[in-house]
Image: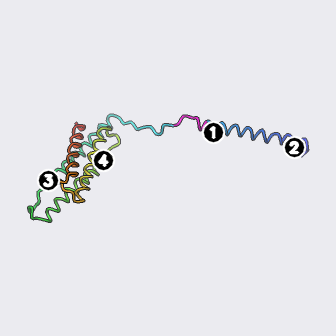
Amino acid sequence: MSTSEQPSTQRVIPIVALVLSVIAVGLAAWAVLRPASSGPAEPTYTSAQQSDAKTAICAATDLVRRGVSLNTNLQIPGGEADVAGSLAVAANARVSLSDGGQYLISRLDPATPTELAGAVKEFANTLLDIGAAATAGSPNTDPEQAARLRTADTQNNAVIERCK
């Protein structure tokens, strides 16, 4: 290389570095100032999808309601003196409450209308709470358990109204 070429190469390197620096600053400014994405869009459902979801969850709620009613009102087969029968009846009641709550939560479709889905979730969670408290030994006469039972009744009626 001749000595006359070295000065031009020495001048090119700072110019290239300056150009790359300007590009980097421009990209950084764009990244900071660009409008933030609002995240994934909320899914939308057709009225047919919402209607099908409503029909399905209302049928599931009715099924749970019938199961809970049946199993919480069973008569002890051998009467009050039948300890095993008494325990079996109580176990069936607890299972129907806990499983009923889980069943409803698992059957909720994302297309279920929001108000109905909220009402079903509240009812399902209350059923789970009642079942857990009963499993822990809370009788229906316990004030907290009695309050849960009243709440479940109110929530059940709210679901029935939304299913009309």
Residue 109 is tagged as: none
- The CA distance from mark 1 to mark 2 is 34 Å
Of helix, strand and loop, which one carries label 3?
A: loop
Q: Which amino acid, mark 4? A: Arg
Q: Which residue is mark 2?
A: 6
Q: Which amino acid, mark 3? A: Asn
Residues under numbered marks 3 and 2 in contact, where contact means CB atoms less than 8 Å apart: no
Q: Position of residue 164 (x, y in %)?
A: 22, 36
- The CA distance from mark 1 to mark 3 is 69 Å
Crowding at mark 3 (Cα within 10 Å: few <14, some 14-19, many 20+): few
Q: Which residue is mark 1?
A: 28
Q: Position of residue 110 (x, y in %)?
A: 35, 42
The residue depicted at 14 percent of the width and 62 percent of the height is 86
Q: Which residue is mark 4?
A: 107
Of helix, strand and loop, which one carries label 2?
A: helix
Of helix, strand and loop, which one carries label 4?
A: helix
Closer to the camera: disc 4 or disc 2? 2
Q: Which amino acid, mark 1? A: Ala
